[in-house]
Image (tube, grey):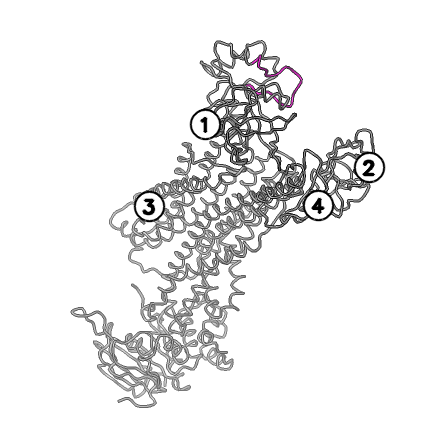
Amino acid sequence: MSTPGAAVRTETLTKTYGSGETLVRALDAVSVDIQRGEFTAVMGPSGSGKSTLMHLTAGLDAATSGRSWIGDVEITSLDDKALTLLRRERVGFIFQAFNLLPTMDARANIVLPLKLANRKPDDAWFDHVVSVLGLGDRLTHRPSELSGGQQQRVAAARALITKPDVVFADEPTGALDSQASEQLLTFLRASVTDLGQTIVMVTHDANAASYADRVLRLADGRIAADERAAAPTGR
Amino acid sequence: MLTSPRRLLSAALALALGVGFIAAALMLGTSLDATLRAAAGGAIRDAKVVLTQDSDRSDAPQLTDTYVAAVQALPEVDRVRPTVSTYAMNITQSSGQMFALQTVPELSDRTRLLDGRLPDAPGEVLVNEVAANLRGWKLGDTVTLDAENRHDFTLVGIIDAATDTTTDPAMPHAFLRMADFSALSGRTTYTDLYVHGSGTEHQVADAVRALPATAGTNAAVLTASEASDQRVREFTRGSEQFAVMLLAFGAVAVIVAGLVVANTFAILIAQRTRQLALLRTVGATRDQVFRTVIAEAALLGLVSSLVGLALGAAAVAIVAPLTRGSHLMRIDGLALAPRDVAVPLVVGVLLAVVAALVPARQATGVPPLAALRPQVATAVDPRARQGRPVAAVAAALGGFALLAVGAVVLPAREVSSGLSVLVGIAGGLISVVAVLALGRRIVPFVARGLGAGMRRLGGVPAELAAENAVRNPGRASATAGALLVGVTLVTMMTVGAATGQASIQRDLDSRFPMDAQVSSWDALTDAQVEVARTLPDVAAVAVLTQSSAEASGGGWLALTGIAPEEAGALRTPDVLAGLADGVLVVGPGAKLADGSRVKLTSGASTLDVTVRVNSGAGQLAALTSATLAELAPEAHRSLGMRFVDGADPVGAVDRIATALGEAGPGVDIISVADQRVQLQGVIDTILLVVLGLLGVAVVIAVVGIGNTLGLSVHERRQESGLLRAMGLTRGQLRASLGWEAALLAAVAVVLGLVLGVVYGFAGVSSLVASDATVVLTVPWARLALIAAAALLAGWLASVLPSIRAAQVPPAAALALGE
């Protein structure tokens, strides 16, 4: 059974596509707890179900069966509207690409979740996040005027600006060169260590995973291994 | 592209509509011409030669019975139909009614005897069905007619007098033998001789001209064709301009259709990029791909044009019965000339092909590799910043300048008004095309301005929409452009109709300042005046006295005497402003200087008066009753009346005639109130039909908005997913797309209203000669309705795409590829 105080937990969470002979089990009765203040990496080859796990636990897609919680809220019982509001308030996202709205500058992209929630940005927190990520001189630039690394750092700032319960990162370094990757991963590591942020990162890159406290390996829709790193990179 | 029927449908509909508009305009012109020809030239029947005596000239021997006999005797001539017509008053116990008086016509397959027989003895009269119904006559009744003299006749027959007998079949007619006609009217000569004969028109005409007596008649000898053309020309002024105006609308409708078609083709081909690239990879040459796209367009154009022709013909056939009974524009039925079919067909096919040219060239530019590459939405259209639109700006300025020339300069110089219309149309078309070409800049500019206001109203969804609407300026301007032209046209028609109606109304008011004028062949009694003041249909009565006088240096004036306190009987009492004893109020047309003193001479008496010129007075020359009595004590007395608002004018005239007829001698009522009501009806009918057609154009444009939005939803799939992940609810996503559509519609509405008002004013100004006053009128309530309807329609267009967009779960939207 799951531990109270988990940031994210699932109980026999299952997602299937198709039916009969063409039935595909993308996720097969996965039960897992993600602790608060931990950096968890989810690894696995293509088709292992790691993205599906992230989509279901983040409330981006509906499970076929099983249950899932964010904090003490059971998201598998929520309707679309409640789920959307929950994401808005308590979840941050960093995707591999198409992270930013091309029509808005960096600042507008960062504060967009607050705007959607009709909240005022906390200026001190905004300045802190922006300066840690080194985006101070890029705030008026549009995404097309930013490098890939800068774009991902804007996405990271946006994910953190709401101080969410959990940040989901889906292959955040997938499109970056090694230097930009390292910069981003170092920041994510620091936000866990220094600020107590909870991060779940889906990746197939072992180097990226080495920054995490815990590595979940998925294969064929099941958890194949659950390892704790003794000394994560960047700690 | 024949595989995407839904999108194709909107292109085909747009084309069919544009072609239908042109077809309807051409067919309407032909039908109108046929009707007018029948009315104006109908009396010629199968005569070979027509002799027409100018009735204003009385200086020579004219078309007498003796001369008719001489023509009849010519070997080339079978028979001669001599006619003469004038007007006579039919008098009954209670009222007088104006009748057309004519010699007895020959019967034909259209002019048929309904009852009785034709007159063959002195004292017998034939009437048309209109007269018989009006008066409730039966054979054997006595008909009293008054022209120069007054005589009683016995009714012996009733005919249906068609347009081959009279130009105005709706009027009551009385027909007399020539001897009776002469005794009644004092006229002993004919105005028209229709000469039937064997041989060609020219042979007969030459024979008639060779007759020595012909020279003495001063009559014009014309062949039937010449006479027909001449009569149609005299008859058709105005209706030709109407057809030209309709054609101009047709041209603009074709431009709207072209926009939607070009945009739709561009979208279709963008979506088919992979398919076309696949064709290239399996060996299709550029030419083959190009030809395929063009051939499909031509086929689409042909099919749509055929549908458009049917639509146009149906529209004219539906309109025709609505015009019956209208004096301004009557159409008896649908008539077709070959060009009415050929021109729209050619225009439709050409339009489709031209609209497909640019997309077809892009299609051939698709490299085979594109089949393998994923499609990625461009953030900002790179073409947006290219090129300076010098040519388009110059064309826009030039177009508006031409418009101004056609509307203001040309009519003022009294060059034939046809030229001013053509110049105005050219200016309108050039400026519309230029504005559309500049749309890429104008539309985003206006959209940003409107978007700023929208943000405050609609929160985050509106803010997203404001940014999204202008991401692809080319697409935004093409989408808004189609609706823009629709709104422009609707606004132009509405403003034009309101302005035209107000102007004609003003003209009627100045020529006929009162709803009705009552006179009697005997003097009106005081009892009748008192009765008139108490009638329920009458809001105000003025006692008028009438005389004429010669003004020193100003020619003859028809003087009206009226007490200033009774000016309320006029529709526009202010035309009498300044009227006092010793003052003569005239319009600018009298060519008398304001403030000058003139001497009026009437018979033996003279009077000095001060001139006061009122711009609205028209042909009115007014004195106070007291002043006119000094000049002409025996002046004829009549009554001017203003009806209560909303009174049925025809019924009111009947009731007034009956009431006054009971109180004294029978009265004659001249009323323009029914003309006013009829004018309103005609303009409303035309407006309704045209707005109906244009309404479909707006619907097409809205379908275009839906198309564009559908494509945008498709392209922004991942972006929508991202927003949904970050907490944008389904409702907010739908609202955002709704705002985007509404914003595009709003841009079209704002620009369209401005342009439409300008074109409406310019159009009426160029149609109307400068000496007529154009009363520029903006029908605000109707324009507000147009704006609301267009905005609502724009929002409706977003409903389907936004539902589709919101249904996609965020995880699926975020997934790459597909």
**Left or right of B85 on screen, residue A168:** left
Give the CA distance from mark 4 to mark 2: 24 Å
Task: Evaluate whether residue A193 shows in this view.
Answer: yes
According to the image, label 4 marks what residue?
A: B530
The residue under label 1 is which amino acid type? Arg
The residue under label 2 is which amino acid type? Glu
Asked if the residue under mark 2 is in contact with the one under mark 4, i.e. CB atoms within 8 Å, the reply is: no
Q: How crowded is mark 4: few (under 14 residues within 10 Å), some or many (20 or more)?
A: few
Name the one closer to the observer, B480 or A91.
B480
The residue under label 4 is which amino acid type? Glu
**Left or right of B143 on screen, residue B705:** left
Asked if the residue under mark 1 is in contact with the one under mark 4, i.e. CB atoms within 8 Å, the reply is: no
Per the rendering, the mark at residue B112 is 1
Q: Do discs 4 and 3 belong to a common subunit?
A: yes
Q: Which of marks 2 and 3 is nearer the N terminus?
A: 3
Asked if the residue under mark 3 is in contact with the one under mark 4, i.e. CB atoms within 8 Å, the reply is: no
According to the image, label 2 marks what residue?
A: B630
Give the CA distance from mark 3 to mark 1: 60 Å
Name the one closer to the observer, B489 or B606.
B606
Position in image of residue B761 (x %, y %): 59, 46
Q: Which secondary structure lies at badge 4?
A: helix
Position in image of residue B91 (x %, y %): 61, 33
Q: Do discs 4 and 1 belong to a common subunit?
A: yes
Quadrant that contains the C terminus of chain B: bottom left
Q: Closer to the observer: label 2 or label 3?
A: 2
The residue under label 3 is which amino acid type? Val
Give the CA distance from mark 1 to mark 2: 55 Å
Magenta-drawn segment: B50-67
